[in-house]
Amino acid sequence: MSAIDQIPDEKARAVLRRLHGEAGHEVWKLLWKYLPYYLRLFSGKKLPWERLQHNHDEDYLASSPGGGMYCYLLARAVDAKRIVEFGTSFGVSTIYLALAVRDNGGGLVIGTEMVPSKAAKARSNIEETGLADYVEIREGNALETLSNLDGPVDFMLSDGFPQYALPVLQLVAPKMRRGAIVVNHNAAAMKGDHAEYVAFVRDPANGFVSSSVVLAGELSVRVATP
């Protein structure tokens, strides 16, 4: 049974299968775009994101089914009612987060997206799942769109361009409750670009306990008594 099969919502499962399929067809295109930068990535050096980010205005930059389900489970585990997503893209991970909020009894996922066409597509995809009432997508630079964020925030997915990851976290952190979780999928693969981010979350003075976690094994959350 696949990760998507675990989603307890037939309509959302159908949309996620379509979106993951579309994203899968673009994998080789993304690999080709980054071919000139593989050596820099593997050696832990920074990439020129100020230039590269504009190469992705039409690309899927989506979580894998396993990564999406991982976020769903964590959000269920902490009973998240208010989630911030930095980097919505076409709304794939947003759907997993919205499902978690709904299944936790209600709340809101606040997504952020800089590219207007992507924000529009994300809203359309989320509307198709029937989860629009649980999502608000803020269009523009997250440092601006999250400046008036209300708390408490229970969960944050940091999945936007690396140069904004730390300042966005620093903006959201004062609104996060004790026990809130932050997931950054890119920190392991793009170590050079996230060195300052990792140093920040691993410094106890900043209020976090943090570690790199490999998505392996079986993670289970008890959500009901049989």
Image (cartoon, helix red, strand yellow):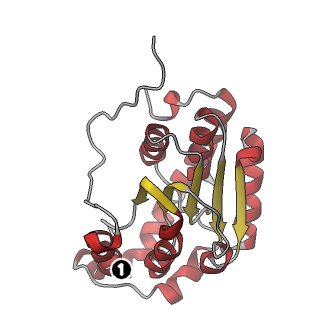
The location of residue 125, given as percent across then percent down, is 72, 49
Q: Nearer the viewer, residue 148 or 158?
A: 148
Q: Secondary structure at mark 1?
A: helix
Q: Is residue 209 above or below residue 1?
A: below
Q: Nearer the viewer, residue 189 or 94?
A: 94
- CA neighbours of label 1 inside 10 A, class few (<14), some (14 to 19), many (20+): many
What residue is drawn where x is 65% and y is 63%? 150
**Residue 209 at least partly seen:** yes
Residue 184, compared with residue 106, is above or below; it is: below
Image location of residue 111, percent across then percent down:
64, 61
Question: Quarter of the image holding residue 39?
Answer: bottom left
Q: Position of residue 210 (x, y in %)?
A: 28, 61
Classify residue 182 as left or right of residue 201: right
Q: Residue furthest toward the top?
A: 226
Instruction: State which quadrant residue 166 falls in.
Output: bottom left
Q: Residue at 46% of width from left, 82% of height from top?
A: 163
Q: Which amino acid type is shown beneath numbered disc 1?
A: Asp
> 224 or 139: nearer the eye?
224
Q: Which residue is mark 1?
A: 193
Provide residue 225's location: percent of width, then percent of height: 45, 15
Report the side of 7 relative to 78 (left or right): right
**Up-down: is 136 above or below 192?**
above
Seen in the picture, residue 81 relative to 30 is either above or below; the reply is above
Please report the residue visible at 61 percent of the width from the left and 62 percent of the height from the top. Answer: 88
